[in-house]
């Protein structure tokens, strides 16, 4: 009997030939990532238990990415970035992407692959629930807490329970009005916010092979919204090409050993989707599994539109939005937040009909912010795009629990960048097919 | 870990996510600084919408205005308790407010791990839907050794599910004490 990708990766990192779902094992970690929100707590735990003079287990494996509360006057938030800075200096960490320097990146889950820290077959842990994004590269990636991260910092190890695998097969080709966001909202709506608790979600099929690496990241990014431990996509030439280019550019570790699913059965769940028959989706307030087809809620009045975050703030997300916004004007406040500085730079170099993406957005009346998490998780009161009033907002982000983007009584609709852009033009929920012509 | 916990219940519904347990604007405080750590207790559960705060009536503050901890000792929740972000500030906030045990129908994975590995509280599970059987303010006694929850106000007893693979860590106190006890930390 073979093994799932997740089982193979975990077995290799436990020094075993094979492991089975349900076993509790200790694994070696390849990369530990932390950011400004959980970094200070993690560092505190590390020092408390390993001593003030302790060194991290491997300075090339600890990556610090400030991204959450960056452009704010909040003194505690700024103090937290200083804590990371001091720790990076003290430990001589090569991978610290400091605010206010040329190295500053923005949202950690997009920065990690861009800077060559994601590789097939590896284990990546991060103090952020959307660390699962990196499963798009065929690795085991999951979110952990500060105490666990403090433990990993000192030992390079952590206990995990080997998850069962749920398999989602996608056939057909992605139509021009759909994005990976629609696919994952459909899946979460079908299985619910705890449908994948303690489980791995594996995405397979020719539909997945046809997706860009950024679309695969969007899929894996939201597995946590179904409670999933990790998401995983089988690596292929698309993956290898991306990883080779990025590790070469950054001079990070270039060798990796991919794994492929050999289980051939034994999954706890299998379902299949025909991409050509899916509809644009939204998740209504206040839960990511509160699914509707856009056509069912079209016309719902909105106050604001938001395109950004690790889910919807990548280059391809903005290219898609620009296809709809070009030469038109938004009717409601529309915020554009690139995930990273690299994405922000692409807004000035990527063009549509001769205009840069930034020109398209500014011409349409959108406000373009700086690379960071911004209002995706509310944050300090002066955060760009934060919902400080009980507004109705359509957003390309990943969570719409009460208060997530700021105000407890605000209603957030999650949708693809195409649907958000189409809705921004009308001020109510709008099917992107109506605007794509 | 305390095996016998007695006190008043604070009842919540399903999908109480980490933004409700501790809203993101308070995450700027550093839990490794004692004076800031205390603040998490003050703001615990302040993001729960009023209709869901203290069931069945709602509108019951978990922590009184200006107080640093709660008068409730046991949180009773529904399904998928603690879903959302990986913030360890969530179980920490409940612990700082004085909670040592939560009894829910099911948990989100990271909240569960954080509760156990950080030694903040015991995430106990009950197969029954307690949310409709316990009222906020009821006097409860949780006996982890016997695996029971007694409702002293109503005179009912409910069975808890076994703690399973994490019992070693819960008994040791946290992941560091556990790893030390099995000789992993040298
Ligand atoms: S963009 Fe949003 S979801 Fe992504 S890491 Fe930042 S706060 Fe979390």
Image: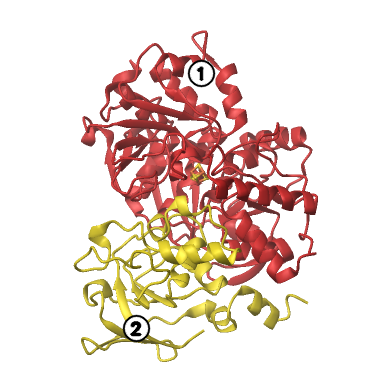
Chain colours: A red, B yellow
Q: Position of residue A31 (x, y in %)?
A: 69, 52
Secondary structure beneath disc 1? helix
Q: Residue at x 75, y 32 (%)?
A: A249
According to the image, label 1 marks what residue?
A358
Q: Residue at x 57, y 82 (%)?
A: B168
According to the image, label 2 marks what residue?
B7
Whole-angstrom CA distance, mark 1 to mark 2, is: 58 Å
Q: Position of residue A75 (x, y in %)?
A: 56, 47
Secondary structure beneath disc 2? strand
Q: Position of residue A205 (x, y in %)?
A: 49, 42
Which circle marks residue A326 in the picture?
Answer: none
Same-chain status of marks 1 and 2? no
Q: Is residue A72 visible?
A: yes
User: In the current view of this chain or complex, which residue is farthest to the left?
Assistant: B57
Along the line of sight, the residue nearer the viewer: B33 or A109 = B33
In the depicted structure, whether residue B35 falls above or below residue A328: below
In the depicted structure, whether residue B11 falls above or below residue A266: below
Q: Is residue A35 visible?
A: no
Q: Is mark 2 within 8 Å of ligand 1?
A: no
Badge 1 sits on which subunit? A
In the depicted structure, whether residue A282 falls above or below residue B172: above
Badge 2 sits on which subunit? B
């Amino acid at each position: 009997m073979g093994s799932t990708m997740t089982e193979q990766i975990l077995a290799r990192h436990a020094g075993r030939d094979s492991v089975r779902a349900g076993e509790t094992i200790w694994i070696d970690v390849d990369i530990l990532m932390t950011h400004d929100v959980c970094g200070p707590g993690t560092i505190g735990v590390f020092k408390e238990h390993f001593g003030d003079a302790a060194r991290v287990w491997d300075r090339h494996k600890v990556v610090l990415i400030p991204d959450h509360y960056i452009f704010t006057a909040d003194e505690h938030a700024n103090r937290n970035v200083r804590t990371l800075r001091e720790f990076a200096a003290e430990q001589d960490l090569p991978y610290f992407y400091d605010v206010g320097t040329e190295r500053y990146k923005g949202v950690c889950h997009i920065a990690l692959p861009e800077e060559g820290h994601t590789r097939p077959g590896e284990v990546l842990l991060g103090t952020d629930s959307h660390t699962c994004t990196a499963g798009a590269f065929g690795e085991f990636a999951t979110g952990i807490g500060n105490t666990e991260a403090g433990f990993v910092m000192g030992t390079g190890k952590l206990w995990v329970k080997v998850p069962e695998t749920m398999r989602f097969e996608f056939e057909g080709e992605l139509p021009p009005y759909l994005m990976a966001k629609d696919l994952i909202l459909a899946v979460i709506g079908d299985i619910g916010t705890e449908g994948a608790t303690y489980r791995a979600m594996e995405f397979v099929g020719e539909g997945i092979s046809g997706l860009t690496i950024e679309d695969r990241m969007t899929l894996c990014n939201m597995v946590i919204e179904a409670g999933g431990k990790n998401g995983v996509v089988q690596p292929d030439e698309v993956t290898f090409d991306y990883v080779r280019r990025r590790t070469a550019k950054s001079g990070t570790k270039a060798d990796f050993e991919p794994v492929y699913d050999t289980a051939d059965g034994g999954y706890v769940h299998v379902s299949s989707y025909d991409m050509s028959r899916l509809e644009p989706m939204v998740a209504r307030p206040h839960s990511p599994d509160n699914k509707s087809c856009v056509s069912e809620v079209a016309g719902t009045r909105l106050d604001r539109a938001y395109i950004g975050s690790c889910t919807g703030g990548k280059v391809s997300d903005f290219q898609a939005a620009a296809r709809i916004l070009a030469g038109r004007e938004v009717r409601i406040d529309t915020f554009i937040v690139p995930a990273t500085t690299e994405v922000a730079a692409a807004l000035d170099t990527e063009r549509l009909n001769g205009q840069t993406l930034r020109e398209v957005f500014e011409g349409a009346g959108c406000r373009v912010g700086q690379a960071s998490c911004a209002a995706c998780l509310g944050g300090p009161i002066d955060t760009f795009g934060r919902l400080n009033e009980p507004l109705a907002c359509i957003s390309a982000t990943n969570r719409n629990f009460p208060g997530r983007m700021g105000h407890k009584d605000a209603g957030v609709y999650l949708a693809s960048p195409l649907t958000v852009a189409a809705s921004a033009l009308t001020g109510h929920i709008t099917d992107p097919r109506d605007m794509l012509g | 870990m305390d095996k016998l916990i007695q006190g008043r219940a604070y009842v919540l519904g399903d999908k109480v996510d980490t933004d409700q347990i501790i809203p993101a604007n308070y995450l700027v405080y550093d839990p490794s600084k004692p004076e800031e750590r205390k603040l998490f207790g003050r703001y615990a559960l302040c993001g729960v919408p009023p209709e869901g705060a203290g069931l069945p009536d709602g509108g019951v503050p978990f922590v009184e205005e200006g107080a640093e901890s709660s008068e409730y000792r046991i949180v009773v929740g529904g399904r998928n308790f603690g879903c959302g972000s990986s913030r360890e500030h969530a179980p920490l906030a409940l612990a700082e407010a004085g909670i040592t045990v939560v009894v829910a129908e099911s948990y989100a994975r990271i909240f569960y791990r954080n509760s156990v590995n950080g030694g903040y509280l015991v995430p106990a599970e009950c197969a029954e839907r307690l949310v409709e059987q316990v009222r906020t303010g009821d006097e409860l006694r949780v006996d982890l050794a016997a695996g029971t929850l007694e409702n002293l106000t109503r005179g009912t007893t409910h069975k808890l599910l076994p703690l399973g693979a994490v019992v070693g860590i819960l008994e040791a106190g946290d992941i560091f004490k556990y790893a030390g006890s099995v000789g992993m930390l040298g």
